[in-house]
Amino acid sequence: MKKLSKDEVLGLFYKLGFFKSFTPEEKYQLADFESHTFTVEPSQFIVEEGDQDRNLYILLKGSAYVTKSLNPRTSLAQLKPGSVFGEVSLLADHPRITNVRAADRCLVMKMDATFIKNLGPEFEIKIKDQLIRVLVNKLERMNQALLKVRKRVPEDEWKLLFDPDV
């Protein structure tokens, strides 16, 4: 993947839902920060479980998959352009809880708390609003998955796992 021009990066911003609430001027300003975009080759890690960095990532181009180190061949999620990951580490100063690995050649934007703060309060609010949306969507999907699992687990075993009084 060749280095994208500012106009090409800007074009990607217009296609991705994460940037929907940003004004054209804000998208243009973000596209100026080429140093915050990087290419990842197929099979390379974008993030590794346990890493201590506090970066937020937005997949601009390509696809990736999420795994746990305990079972690296089982994909927990497929990421596509517009997918956001790293929000837990950014917001909670928490080590990485999963691996994210490129399925094909990817273009990724990376933001840390200082970068976001330096963009200014309007940017910071919009980014945090988007992160809230992302987290709510992930929580809803987790709840749906948990309900499916719940139907297969006997009541006594379920209580051992989730009942605080047991």
Image: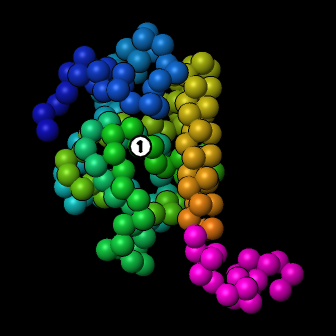
Vertical placement of residue 52 versus 72, above or below: above
Residue 90 seen from this side: no
| Residue shown at the point (31%, 27%) measured from the top left | 12
Tell me, yes or no, whether the highlighted magenta stretch contains residue 143.
Answer: no
Vertical placement of residue 160 versus 53, above or below: below
Tell me, yes or no, whether the highlighted magenta stretch contains residue 157.
Answer: yes
Say which residue label 1 marks.
83
Q: Residue furthest top?
A: 25
The picture places residue 76, in percent across and down from the top left corner, at 42, 65
Q: Is residue 48 left or right of residue 134?
A: left
Vertical placement of residue 62 versus 10, above or below: below
Location of residue 14 (image quadrant): top left
Q: How is the image coloured?
A: rainbow
The picture places residue 78, in percent across and down from the top left corner, at 36, 55
User: Which quadrant would the C terminus be assigned to in this image?
Assistant: bottom right
The picture places residue 100, in percent across and down from the top left corner, at 37, 58
Q: Which residues are magenta?
A: 148-166
| Residue shown at the point (67%, 87%) measured from the top left | 154
| Residue shown at the point (36%, 50%) measured from the top left | 79
Q: Residue furthest left?
A: 2
